[in-house]
Image: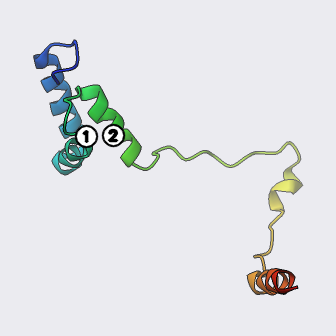
């Protein structure tokens, strides 16, 4: 926290809020990931936490204007046939 211009009390409150939101173990892990030679503020630790967590929002499926298009389902790809094609092309 030494390199930031924000008051230490504000930094401490932010770190405690991060602990409440993400848990103590996640906060300790983020603090351990921060570079040792320099001290960074709570915003830096928050960035580490947000990058480590998977995205929370999932996008809804695309809705098309024509309802019959929603019924289209693609078959699973035949990976064995694809691998055989790629292997024969690389050997030639």
Q: Are marks 2 and 1 in contact (CB under 8 Å)?
A: yes
Q: Earlier in the sequence, mark 2 or mark 1?
A: 1
Pointer 1 local density, CA inside 10 Å: few below 14, some 14–19, many at least 20: some
Tell me the mark number nearer the camera, choosing from 2 and 1.
Answer: 1
Above or below, comparing residue 59 to residue 75 in the picture = above
Nearer to me, 71 or 34: 34
Residue drawn at (88%, 85%) of the image: 92
Q: CA distance from mark 2 to mark 1?
A: 8 Å
Above or below, comparing residue 88 to residue 34 in the picture = below
**Colour scheme of this structure image?**
rainbow
- Give the secondary structure at mark 2: helix
61 vs 2, left or right, is right
Q: Position of residue 84 (x, y in %)?
A: 80, 87
68 vs 79, left or right, is right
Q: Position of residue 29 (x, y in %)?
A: 22, 49
Q: Which mark is residue 83?
A: none
Nearer to me, 50 or 84: 84
5 vs 8, left or right, is right
Q: Which mark is residue 34?
A: 1
Q: Position of residue 44 (x, y in %)?
A: 30, 30
Instruction: Specify the quadrant of the image occupied by residue 50.
Output: top left
Total count of labels? 2
Residue drawn at (25%, 40%) of the image: 34
Residue drawn at (16%, 46%) of the image: 24
Pointer 2 local density, CA inside 10 Å: few below 14, some 14–19, many at least 20: some
Q: Position of residue 12 (x, y in %)?
A: 13, 25
Query: The N terminus is located in which quarter?
Result: top left
Q: What residue would you read off at disc 2? A: 48
- Give the secondary structure at mark 1: loop
């Amino acid at each position: 926290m030494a390199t930031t211009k924000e008051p230490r009390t504000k930094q401490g409150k932010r770190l405690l809020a991060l602990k409440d939101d993400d848990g103590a173990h996640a906060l300790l892990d983020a603090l351990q990931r921060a570079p040792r030679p320099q001290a960074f503020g709570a915003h830096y630790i928050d960035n580490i936490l947000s990058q480590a967590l998977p995205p929370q929002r999932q996008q809804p499926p695309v809705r098309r204007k024509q309802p019959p298009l929603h019924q289209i389902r693609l078959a699973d790809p035949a990976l064995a046939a694809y691998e055989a094609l790629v292997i024969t092309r690389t050997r030639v």
